[in-house]
Image (cartoon, rainbow, N blue to C red):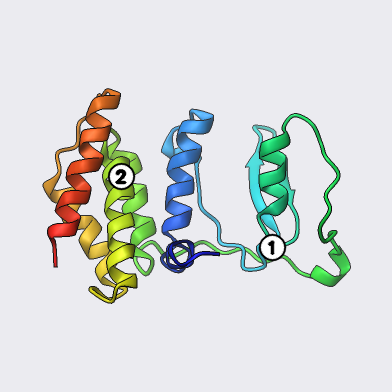
Amino acid sequence: MGAKITIDSASLMNKGLELIEARWLFNLPAAQLDVVVHPQSIIHSMIEFVDGSVKAQMSVPDMKLPIQYAMTYPERVEACFVENNFPLIGTLNFFQPDRHKFECLGIAYDALEAGGTAPCIVNAANEIAVQKFLEKKIGFTGIPELIKKCLDRVPNHQKPDLGIVFETDKKTRELALSLY
């Protein structure tokens, strides 16, 4: 993983961004989406159907297989990397993340509920906040603080066109760069 993905994983912003992505990919309301932390990183995604059954995409804790599947869909291409060894994996654990402890995840949920350009603001502000953290200009707890300041100051357009989305992204990045 690269530096940004590592920081996003530590703050759980990666899960928040995946939540926002899932909302649009599957056209589901926020109430039907949830984040579950799975420390073994074997399950990459799950979906629960109306009958209560669950399907999961499982593989070794590496993104090669999910990426291969995305690139070759709908075909299934033989993988040339490590195979699953479920007896070696052992137990699979899951827990609900604490949205207060992981502020970035809470911010992503709030942006999803707010709609409009709020998710765009969160994404742009997070990218600059992580950059500032990596440059040692802010501390780890400064990441959600910077994102919240951007959400407070950049207008949330409820029915944006693509031009407004790009303008919101630009204004958010400029504001985030000017802070601290």
Q: Give me the disc on residue 61.
A: 1
**Residue linked to disc 2:** 111
> Which picture quadrant has residue 20?
top left
* Of 23 and 6, the residue lying toward us: 6
Q: Judge from the rendering whether residue 77 lies leftward or rightward of residue 23; answer left or right.
A: right
**Residue sitting at 79 percent across and 31 percent down?**
75
Which of the two marks, 2 or 1, is nearer to us in this view?
A: 1
**Where is residue 180 drawn, in percent x and y?**
14, 68
**Residue sitting at 11 percent across and 48 percent down?**
153
**Residue sitting at 84 percent across and 60 percent down?**
84
User: Type of residue at label 1?
Assistant: Pro
Which mark sits nearer the N-terminus, 2 or 1?
1
Secondary structure beneath disc 2? helix
Q: Give me the disc on residue 51.
A: none
**Where is residue 90 drawn, in percent x and y?**
80, 70
The N terminus appears in which quarter of the rendering?
bottom right
Secondary structure beneath disc 1? loop
* Of 68 and 15, the residue lying toward us: 68
> Which picture quadrant has residue 91?
bottom right
How far apart are the two marked residues, 2 and 1, measured between alpha carbons?
A: 29 Å
Q: Judge from the rendering whether residue 53 lies leftward or rightward of residue 119; answer left or right.
A: right
The reply to whether dot 2 and dot 1 touch (C-beta < 8 Å) is no
The total of numbered circles placed on residues is 2
User: Type of residue at label 2?
Assistant: Ala
